[in-house]
Image (cartoon, rainbow, N blue to C red):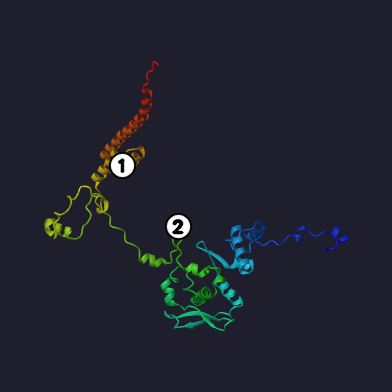
Amino acid sequence: MSTPTTLEAIRNPAPREASLPPVRAGFFDLQGFELLQRVAKAFASSSLVPAHYQNNVANCMIALNLARRLGADELMVMQNLYIVHGNPGWSSKFLIASVNTCGRFETLRYEWRGTEGSDDFGCRAWTIEKSTGERLNGTWIDWKMVKAEGWNKKNGSKWLTMPDQMFVYRSAAFWQRAYAPEISMGLSSQEELIDTVEVRADGSVAVTSTLEELRAGRAQPAEEVPRGAEPAQTGPAAESRQAGTPLAATQANPVDDQDGPADDGNQGQGGFDFDVAGLVRGIREDIESAATAEDLDLARSAIAGVPDESAKADLNAAASARMRAITAAAEQGQQQPRAGAARRTRAPISAD
């Protein structure tokens, strides 16, 4: 039975939006996308958000979506989500706070070992799982790992100025990635992105070497060889040339079983043999055997790789002659049916 309508309800009707279902912000619903975009515009126009969110509606929309999935405050997510080398990453203090407030574990604690300043000095994070009471130990982070990964080699690295804090941050990030990866949504921490050599999409990398290391390991310039000079050779050939003895006398195996003589006149750059005569011969055979214009075009495309200009001119002339022959043969083939039809004899008319 429907609710009776009162005079007061008729005079002051409820707004239309109150009768509509609630709209949930998201990317794959028209009303949800419009709501998410309106909220993102408000954040993008604020000066309280970091610089990479100001006047950038798209970044704000992505941060709002992450905040909704994590159930966290939107401004807190924006303040702790950084862009390093084009990759998003959480601040380590945000990951630690998320672990401590998720309700599944006790507060993260840190265990130290080794002598300060030695390679075995390091830290690991641990805590107790509330549901089982089990102690969950993280990975040991020590100076040996820091040096092996090159985290302390970048100019301005925090490992050189505040190593204890970096040990805490890195051990917490390793623990979170091992026992609660859903908290970071698969993203690394900001400090890890800064310390790690990142390969970008265009193939460039963020170098972690210091300026002193680059200067110490500067590559020596390559030795220049004058044009026309004979490259230096090593091995039996060079030794026999220095001693004044013929090369054949220094070789142990005879060369009589080779298929043909070596072509020393067509040696290309870098000491590799390049058979120009064989290339020209192969192109000429392809031109002569071409039956269609497509086959001839394929053979012509290889003429550009011939270094000898005279041979190249001869091949172009042969290709032109072959093209004329192919065209004439095609025209003759089209005219023969017509001529046969025109010369068709007519049978004599019978007297009967």
Residue 20 appears left or right of 313: right
Disc 1 residue type?
Answer: Ile
Packing grade of label 2 (10 A; few <14, some 14-19, many >=20) is few
The picture places residue 89, in percent across and down from the top left corner, at: 54, 67
- Image quadrant in which you'd find residue 76: bottom right
- Asked if residue 281 is positioned above or below residue 331 in the image, the reply reads below
Give the labeled residue for mark 1: 303
Residue type pointed to by label 2 = Asp
- Distance in Å between CA atoms under marks 2 and 1: 35 Å
Q: Residue at x 33, y 62 (%)?
A: 219
Vertical order, 147 against 347 (above or below): below
Q: Is residue 244 visible?
A: no
Q: Nearer the viewer, residue 76 or 61?
A: 61
- The reply, left or right, for residue 257 in relation to residue 155 is left
Q: Examine the image and state in which quarter residue 316 appears.
A: top left
What is the quadrant of the C terminus in the image? top left
Front in this rendered view, residue 135 or 339: 339
243 vs 317, left or right, is left
Q: Residue furthest right?
A: 7
Quadrant into which the N terminus falls:
bottom right
Relative to 71, residue 334 above or below: above
N-terminal of the pair, mark 2 or mark 1, is: 2
**Is the residue marked by circle 1 packed among few (<14), some (14-19), or many (20+) residues within 10 Å?**
some
Badge 1 element: helix
Q: Secondary structure at mark 2?
A: loop
Q: Tell me where residue 77 appears, x and y as whole percent.
A: 60, 67
* Circle 2 or circle 1, nearest the eye: 1
Q: Which mark is residue 202?
A: 2
Q: Which residue is more in the foreground, 132 or 306?
A: 132
User: What x and y, as percent, mark residue 153?
Assistant: 43, 70
Residue 241 visible (yes or no): yes
Q: Residue 102's spot in the image, x, y percent?
A: 61, 75
